[in-house]
Image (cartoon, rainbow, N blue to C red):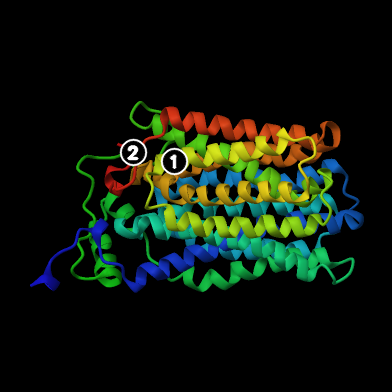
Amino acid sequence: MAQDALHAYDDAPLRPFHLRVAVASFGGVFSDGFGLGIIGIALGLATPALQLTPLWLGLLGGASLAGLFFGALFTGPVADRHGRRPVYANNMLLLGLLSALQFFVQSAPQLLILRLLIGFMLGTDYVVSKALLTEFTPRAFRGRIMSSLSVAWAGGYACAYFIGYLLSDLGPQAWRWMLLSSALPCLAVLPLRITLPESPLWLAGRGRAAEAARIVRERIGAHVQAPSPPPQAKPATGQWGQLFSPVWRRSTLVGCLFFTCQVVPYFAVGTFVTRVLEALQVSGSFVGGLIYNAALLVGAIVGLNVVDRLPRRTFLIGSFAITAAAMFALLAFPDPGRLTIIGLFAVFAGVLSAASNLVYVYLPELFPTHLRASGIGLAIAASRIGSAASTFLLPLVVANYGVRTALAACGVILLIGGLSCLRWAPETRGTTLDAAGR
């Protein structure tokens, strides 16, 4: 009978359990976006209390991104060696506690230490959320569900801006309440995280087929085949050296390059968007910032709807071309006017946010199961070197060389990303996870 037919693990029907895993991952990614978004608003209000100079603004703006580098880099091999679940189940608790401690800081160095630790925990979640959700989600739904993480991230980032606006009237201590609010989504998602099982794909790859079969039977259904052990022995750990071997180095290069060139302008402009608009002499820069963040959310939703309708490679290269064109168009006119500036920034934000769906879909598809977390972690770490440096440098460059120089650098980085993907990016749409990266 049809209902007795066995489904391959990668082609399983969508179950409520899959949606539960998705919601648990969405909550973590929302928390990530909120935590990174709130700092740019809070720092402006905290400047008098903490006596922040442009140097300290740059350090604090980039601290979480620097912490992300180490969190992602070291979590990848740990998750490939010991599983996704141990980190996935516990990191939101630590992130929530660290976020709450920001309320009590009395100096810039104290806040800097906390932002570095928060960034580290965010880096752990970037790795395990992508890996675990990818490995549970059936192939037919993977693009849309993984893309929803981008909407969750953009939603958290945009929500931080709106929450910051609502809390801004609480007086000179408003910045403390803004930073404290970032603990709430972390703790809200924790109950879902701690009740989820390990990835059956990871278990099968480690020779624990019976455990994988039990999880598939109990959580997904008796008529779904458990993933098979790999046909040949794989190394027990995902070592970075393997990522640069002839078999995998193209995937590694593309993952690091596209992610880095995407997030450098994303964070450099997004973290200090009101300051950038002020430097461009845009009146009502706070309203412009609201439009910018709304464009991020709309772009993520648009990306969710087109990610499975376009080849991954076409989506990737096209997004770089459009965002680079928006940056250079902004610089082409000596006095483009308020509406033109805000409009071009909205196009830049919307398209870049739509393309960020590919971080959640394309990046995990570049690597096989035994290297997936390590590959994702290395790509995230590489991207955070650039984004932390750019977030640190942007206020200094604007102060010393002008905003147009900073925006021109962002345009060049986007152009490099597009040309690199045109040369090396493979197409991965429709591949199974076991065939990923081959």
* Residue kind at label 1, given as amino acid type: Gly
Q: Residue furthest left?
A: 1
Q: Position of residue 172 (x, y in %)?
A: 89, 66
- Is 26 on the left or on the right of 122, as rendered? left
* Residue kind at label 2, given as amino acid type: Gly
Of the residues tagged 1 and 2, which is closer to the observer? 2
User: Which residue occupies the foreground of this view, 101 or 42?
Assistant: 42
Q: Are marks 1 and 2 in contact (CB under 8 Å)?
A: yes
Comes first in the chain, label 1 or label 2? 1
User: Which residue occupies the foreground of this view, 373 or 252?
Assistant: 252
Label 2 Cα crowd, 10 Å radius (few <14 / some 14-19 / many 20+): many
Q: Position of residue 282 (x, y in %)?
A: 81, 49
* Residue 234 visible to an observer of this rendering: yes
Point out the image quarter for the C terminus: top left
From the image, tell me which residue sits under label 2: 437
From the image, tell me which residue sits under label 1: 375
- Is 189 on the left or on the right of 361, as rendered? right
* Residue 385 visible to an observer of this rendering: no
